Structures are given as C-alpha cells and as structure tokens.
Image (cartoon, rainbow, N blue to C red):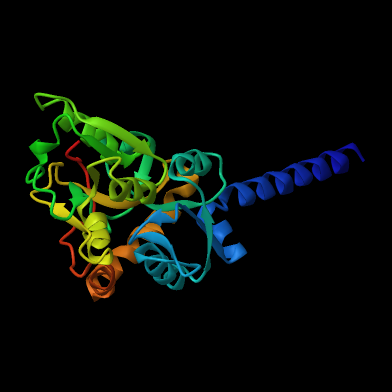
Amino acid sequence: MQKRLLLKAALGAALLFGASVSVHAEDALAKIKSAGTLKVGTETAFAPFDFIDAGDHVGLNVDLFAEIGKELGVKIEWVALPWDGVLPALEAGKFDIVAGPATITKARMERYRFTAPIAEATVAILKKAGDKTITKPEDLAGKAVGVGKATAQLAQLQEFSATLPKKIDVHEYVSFNDAYADMAAGRVVAVANSLPNIAFVAKQRNGAFEVVLPPFGKKSYFGFIGTKDADHASLIDAVDAALIKMKGDGRMAKLQEKWFGTKFDTPDSVKDPAF
C-alpha cells in the first residue's frame, strides 16, 4: 500500500514537473503565435516611419510590420505612446517589440537587442527655406535648435554643440511635429533629426523647409527594438529573418523607395555602432 502511494506521488510529481517545463518552454514567439497577435509599440509622430494621415496610422513601419506579420503568420496590434514612454513600456511588458524605430547606439545595445537595420539614421539639420544664415552645420553655434526629447538625435546634437565656439540653444520636444511647428513660427531656427525624416518633411512641406548638407552626425542606422532576455530571443530571431528575407527579395527596397524616394544600403546587423 505504502509503495503504491509512493509511486502515485512520484508520478504526480513527474507530471507537474513536465507541465512546468512545458509552460517554461513556451517562449515569447510561441505565445505570440498561439495568440495570433504580435503587439508592437511605437509613437505616431515620426514621419515617414510612423504617423497619422487623414486619421489613419501609416508609414514605413506599418508596411514593414504588415510583411513581418505575414512571415510569422500573425496579426499586428499597434500600441502608440509618446516616445519617452515607449521603451519603459517595452520593459514593463506592454508589448512584444518596438517599431519606433530607434538609432542603434552602443548604450542602447547594452540594454536592448536590435533587429537588422531598416534605414540609415545619420543626423542632419532642417531649416526654413531661404535662411542664408545657416549654410552648414557649424552655423548653428549660438542658435536655437529643436530636437526630440530622449532621442539619439538629442545626444548627437549635444555632442556636436560642445565642439562649437558657442553652444547651441537646444530646445527639446516630446514630438518632432511640435519642433517643426516652432521652426515655422520662428521660435527655433532649425531642427535636428535623421536625414530620412527631414528629407521626407522637406518634401511634404512644399518648399517651406530645406535640408542642410552635409549631415553633422556619425553614420548610423535605425532598427526595431526588443528586450535581451532569453524568452524573447526567438522572436527577435524571427523578425530578423523576416527583415533579411525582405531585403533579399527586394520588398524592403521597394518600401524605402515608397516612403523616402530612395533606398538605403544597410548592413544585415550592426555589431559596433559609431557612437
């Protein structure tokens, strides 16, 4: 009798252990496929990657994740927040991955895992058309310049400012759209953002703004962001595979042409960012 009880107890423990291993083995990708939905965090004021047009959420990210969803066999659910709240929300588990996208930097790579790059992110300057006081980045010395709060563009603008004879008067904005509005109103003379973003804005504003070349930032790239924990490794691997497949079959270049009017020569991964 005692032996039978011990045997039952042992079998019960084995079943519980097996169930525990099974639950633990279901990582983020498995859970996402089981639910049929990939939750993606972003902000919607970063054209042409993510923005609202006539009430619709559109942009390169929307198109890219539509393709990623097809590759993974899941639907995409978007969660929009101001940019300074997106990464904390990722860490809190509010969504599975961040579209953003974000500039791939050394500091961010220590904390997050990036996907394959989706576009160039080198920082440049946008000014009002016809402003002859700004013909090169160095002309920003002592002037009021807008930039996004908690962005890599802010960090690079501050670093560039430190090299000038007179520091730039940096104005931080939660939304780049607010920075562009303040530039149009004359509150700042320029806005620092990635070259793809400001090229798009200049094109959309019908000659109201101009891009100042060359870019002042270090060569850099945009990528999507995930957490570095082992549970999410297979998800980022799967998104990486989808992006590299899209790069190889021409879908990514086609979407870059659609949103930027050009395509970017990007590496499959960034091991050692410029900053």
Q: Which residue is drawn at 9% across and 51% down?
A: 213
Asked if residue 111 is positioned above or below residue 40 in the image, the reply reads above
Look at the picture and state if 223 lies above or below 145. Answer: below
> Residue 215: x, y in percent?
12, 47
Horizontal side of 242 relative to 157 (left or right) equals right
* The one of 131 and 178 positioned closer to us in this rendering: 131
Residue closest to the eye, 8 or 29: 29
Q: Could you say where residue 252 lies in the image, as x and y percent from the top left?
A: 27, 69
Between residue 92 and residue 212, name the one nearer to us: 212
Which quadrant does the N terminus fall into? top right
Give the mark count.
Answer: 0
Q: Is residue 122 visible to the viewer in this orientation of the structure?
A: no
Q: Quadrant of the C terminus?
A: top left
In the image, 212 versus 98, the foreground residue is: 212
x%, y% of residue 236? 40, 53
Along the horizontal axis of the image, is 216 left or right of 74? left
Quarter of the view holding residue 274: top left
Q: In this view, does 59 lie to the left or right of 85?
A: left
Coordinates of residue 81 in the picture (x, y in percent): 51, 48
Is residue 200 toward the left or the right of residue 39 in the image?
left
Is residue 79 visible from the viewing direction of this image? yes
Q: Residue at x 74, y 42 (%)?
A: 13
What residue is shown at x 66% (from left), y 49% (from top)?
18
